[in-house]
Image (cartoon, helix red, strand yellow):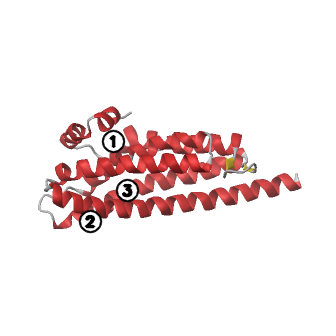
Amino acid sequence: MSNHIWGLIHHPDKEWRSINEEHETVSHLYTHHVLWYALIPVVCSFIGTTRFGWTFGGEEVFQISVTSGLALGVVFYALILAAVAVVGSVIHWMAKKYPERPSKAECIVFAGYTATPLFLSGVFALYPVFWLCVLACVIGLCYTAYLLYAGTPSFLGISRKQGFILSTSTLCIGVLVLEVLMIAVVLLWSMGSEHSIVWHFFS
């Protein structure tokens, strides 16, 4: 698994330089980082929704079956893996005007490591209280933004002013991708919940 987690949390500037020097491939990123850390929100969501159930501040609990949870977990996992590649491709496209434009693979690697705080915040889905999960997601997103702003100038070899502009654009698109992902997960979870209720009624 990745050895950059502590560095990204403790000294991101230094760690970004180390990541840049490694020239990591997309396949290595996924097999040593993304595939493992993307499991955190997926596994925690599965445990939380099948064993405890979602609560939205009231007494009512919405719980799904293990079968539905497994199916939704697979789709959720695939969406996360795809989202990393999409954001990396967006970074590559937006960097086209810079002379030292990184390759598409390098941009996907950059996106994969930038998303690390969001992966880690998924642990709060173990006990899926809605407001707590939203708070954890916001904190994860804030640190993801920090990593993005800290890493973009050195990654693209541009000034901090240019890096700020590009990071802001990337963050806006990244938030949009995250919102689409969250909406998809909520819709899928809702369908799974309804399926479980119907199955329980007829069983």
Say what secondary structure mark 2 lies in: helix
Q: Which of marks 1 and 2 is in front?
A: 2
Residue at the image position 51 percent from the left and 48 percent from the top: 135
Query: Which secondary structure, mark 3?
Result: helix
Mark 3 vs mark 1, CA separation in Å: 14 Å
Name the spot of residue 47 as percent of width and height, x first.
64, 40
Q: Which amino acid type is shown beneath numbered disc 3?
A: Ala
Can residue 109 be seen at all in this image of the molecule? no
Classify the position of the N terminus by image quarter.
Answer: top left
Give 34 or 129, whichever is nearer the viewer: 129
Amino acid type, mark 1: His
**Badge number at residue 85:** 3
* First in residue order: circle 3 vs circle 1: 1
Residue drawn where x is 18% and y is 52% of the image: 153
The crowd level at tag 3 (other Cα within 10 Å; few <14, some 14-19, many 20+) is some
Measured as percent of width and height from the top left, residue 79 is found at 49, 56
Tag 1 residue: 28
Q: Mark 2 points at which residue?
A: 93
Report if residue 102 is visible in the image: yes
Give the foreground label among 3 and 1: 3
C-alpha distance separating marks 1 and 2: 22 Å
Helix, strand or loop for disc 1: helix
Q: Earlier in the sequence, mark 3 or mark 2?
A: 3
Q: Where is residue 142 in the image (x, y as percent from the top left)?
A: 38, 50
Identify the residue at horizontal 39%, vertical 44% (top origin): 116
- Point 24% across, 48% down: residue: 151
